[in-house]
Image (cartoon, coloured by chain):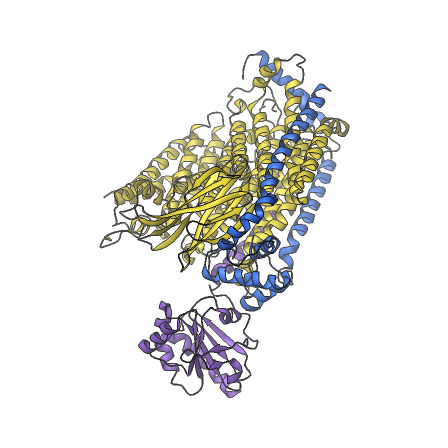
Chain colours: A purple, B yellow, C blue
Amino acid sequence: MKKSLIPLGLFLALSCTLALGLARPGSDEVPSPLVGKPVPAFQLSHLDNEKKVFTPADLKGKVWVLNVWASWCVSCRKEHPVFLELGQRKDLILVGFNYQDARDSGLQWLKKHGNPYRLTVFDEDGRAGMDLGIIGVPETFVIDRQGKVRHKFTGILTPELVQTRLLPLLKELQGA
Amino acid sequence: MMPDIGQLALILALGLALLLGTLPLWGAHRNDERCMQLARPLAAGQFVFLLLAFAALLNSFIRNDFSVSYVASHANSMLPVHLRIAATWGGHEGSLLLWLIMLGGWTWAVALFSRQLPLPMVARVLGVLGLITVGFISFTLFTSNPFERLLPAAADGQDLNPLLQDPGMIFHPPLLYMGYVGFSVAFAFAIAALLSGEVDAAWARWARPWTLVAWLFLTLGILLGSFWAYYELGWGGWWFWDAVENASFMPWLVGTALIHSLAVTEKRGSFKNWTLLLAILAFSLSLLGTFLVRSGVLSSVHAFASDPQRGLYILLFLVVVIGGSLALYAWRAPSVGLGGRFEWFSRETFLLLNNLFLLVAMGTVLLGTLYPLAIDALGLGKISVGPPYFEAVFVPLMLPVLVLMAVGPFVAWKRGNARRLWQDLRWALLGSVLLAGALALVARSTVGVALGVLLAVWIGLATLWHVVLRLRSGAPEPGRWWRRGRAVPAAFWGMVVAHAGVAVFVLGVTLVKGLDHEQDSVLAVGERVQVAGYDFHFQTLTRHEGPNFIAGRARFEVSRNGRPVATLHPEKRFYVVQRMPMTEAAIDRGFTRDLYVSLGEASAQGKWGVRVQVKPFMGWVWAGCLFMALGGLLAAADRHYRRQRLAHPVPRSTGPLGELGELAPTLP
Amino acid sequence: MLEGRALLAAALAGMLWLVGMAEEASAALGGQEAEVAQVAQVAQVAQGARQAGDTSLDERAQRLAQELRCLVCQNQTIADSHAELAVQLKAELREQLRQGATDEQVRQFMVDRYGEFVLYRPPLNLTTALLWGSPLVLLLAGGGLFLAHVRERKRALQGLPDSQLPDALDGDCHEAENDAANEGRGST
């Protein structure tokens, strides 16, 4: 009697796994290995000025948010109003990251849709983006005073996400 | 109007299925002949209505009836007719209808071809099939109704996914489903046997041809899926251990174990419990495959649009069907008899070993497929389990099977003779070692390739020798061989052909994986690239319009040592309705190699990314699978399955080991 | 014994045939020396930055690329995918290999940026211990059950006389006799 119960037992274990998989569907987003680590050092020129260069060390001691966008990205246009609002806040510094674009197109886009960024860097070939583990656009990083990446948003940053995830995090980081 | 008829037909089918699932089973339990007699007509009736429902959906597609939501999301007025027919099963809802007519068809076939079975058995088998049908029809009606209307009707449809717009799409799902659903018959036989308490050699003899046919269809279905992926997806691969591919492969592995296990039960009355379990397992894996593909727990290029609610329904269905059958097994199995005796060195042991390795292989594939899901669900992160893992674990597990496959047929039932075995096999062993060794030296191949060739030749030679032995025994004069060949049962030829198919397949896979050459280049029109001694000249690029796409069509002239070999026309298509780009590879198939060219992206300077592959012996991979399927067909066609009157008796087990019963003829 | 020699002869014939095939295949794959130089110039134009003698680097890059996942595709390696990110990553890894990085270093590079998800061959750690260990564990468990079952059944059937056990006829010889009987009846 005992041995013939094994298949049933195994199956019930399997069903639990499947039920768990159904109940807690893994999100499509891939967790970033950068969270908790120092933001990768990169050196990129400003979008509006080739000669000026930015590196993350420049913002050491400050809490800042890096928003990756491109002029060819439709979703970026959708989330842009959120950043227009965020750009007015005092508790963060908003930095834009123009990813795999043409300088003119990038500047045009900002002119057309508004520029909330303190500054925007230009990554033409995507090499720096690779160091940041960027898979697509838009993506948004939150970096703390010590220069560590604390969170990465993949996809559109919705007002809801701002309320539930971004603002509480900013509060925590500001207090530190 | 037609969609409404279809809807109604589906409901009526459900009603009949409910009757089929209850009355005959009750009749068998109570020995009520009238209730049992209802099984066959009910099976026929449910099939008629299922066919009607399917015909109604087919009709809606052909007529471009965009008032039906399902048609609107999967077809378009520009879609050619033959693809509109295939689109019927291109999506989740329609594919369920396809599953249903397969199920109805198999049920009806069992009703038709079961004259020699006792009525209670027929009633039980059909009853179980009826219950499964009830589950599927209710799933369709309540969560995935293909006849749902779109009001107001769409002006035009969203077109079929371009990946599916291909003749392969017409045949791959039906063949595959014939296999999946076919295992439900073996399952029904197993449940019927457990319910009645009568499990013996006769039962195995009844169940085996059904299982063989289901298995061969599954083989063909998987083959066609791979064949199609090879030319359709444009990267030259044909098996990726993708979750959905694994979902079809696991029932195949268990099905293979099952047909071998049934052989033992049929001939020796042994392995009864194990065979029952395998029959339940094969169909369970078919159902599990359905779950994985439609519930959204796993993302895959094959998966239908995900919907957790549907997933929940299927999971519950799984728990009821599989859990119920395994519970029945746990309850009844201990009282099933043990069958014949056998020694450690016997064909029975070899077949058990075959089963062991096949099942362990299935287990590792299952684990590898579900692992990322489990890890993610437990919050332990996101990992990928892909071809490197599967190949690393699957291949070593299959090596013993391949070695034993050649040996097993030479070992006698019950008590084998080791010395005789050595005498029988030593030439084949020598021959294969010599051949593989020579090849390894000449071609300077890797150990892996040499090993693969060794195994393939080993199986081939041993199988050949087995045929020689069989044909010559008792026939000293030549000429008698041919007559003797006709007297040998078809089941024997089935085994021979199937095993030879495995050898061909292994040879093909070894050589194509070990010796293939691939090169990515960026070419402008007029440029050429050399791969593996072939010269590929990118001659022209023209614009070309299809019924629902625009394409850039390249012409490649392939030559070798200055002599032209082939002209290939790879395309880069853009499907206008779904706005989706697709690459159509161009393949020149040959007996010893495939030449494969596909276009990638166009660069800004007007150059194109081009991938060229030279794949040795690729065709042997397909041929091997075809032989396997043919072997299954031959085995299923063996006359002794169709004999009504039984010539020689084979006793059923008695006393504490089983029940007395009738007898069956001796078998190869 | 005639059959044995016939089989050996067949094996030798087959060997010669396959050797012939292999010669052809290996010649095709190995390439003839004289042509390479001429063709190299044309090939260079076509293949951009590739240089003659890069084949082993290409092979390494290809093998590595086949183990890495394309993150913007459903389920494909960066070797097979035509997606822009995949092409970029493939070029990046090739460049790193060219500069002397080991396979492990390249893999670590990818994992640092994209996580373990990017590896199609899961790393061996505590989380994946069950995954990598399962084939052996299952085999041992299955083997154990198999042995136990056969032993138990032998014990159970020990004392019973043969007459009470269902016995089909033994081995091949009887099968062949059955064929003869069928033949005699003129049936197939």
Q: Please identify the quadrant where the N terminus of chain A is shown.
A: top right
Q: Is residue A8 left or right of residue B108?
A: right
Closer-to-camera residue (B290/C52): C52
Q: Is residue A91 above or below residue B521?
A: below
Toward which corner of the image does residue B631 lie, by quadrant? top right
* Observer able to see residue B415: no
Which percent across, then down, holds residue B330? 59, 45
Which percent across, then down, holds residue B255? 55, 39
* Observer able to see residue B301: yes
Q: Is residue A131 left or right of residue B414?
A: left
Closer-to-camera residue (A28/B116): A28
Residue in the image at 71% along x and 32% along y: B429
Q: Is residue B566 above or below residue B541?
A: above
Which percent across, then down, holds residue B127? 44, 37
Which percent across, then down, holds residue B607? 42, 55
Q: Is residue A12 above or below residue C113?
A: above
Closer-to-camera residue (B287/C24): C24
Toward which corner of the image does residue C176 lie, by quadrant? top right
Closer-to-camera residue (C155/A107): A107
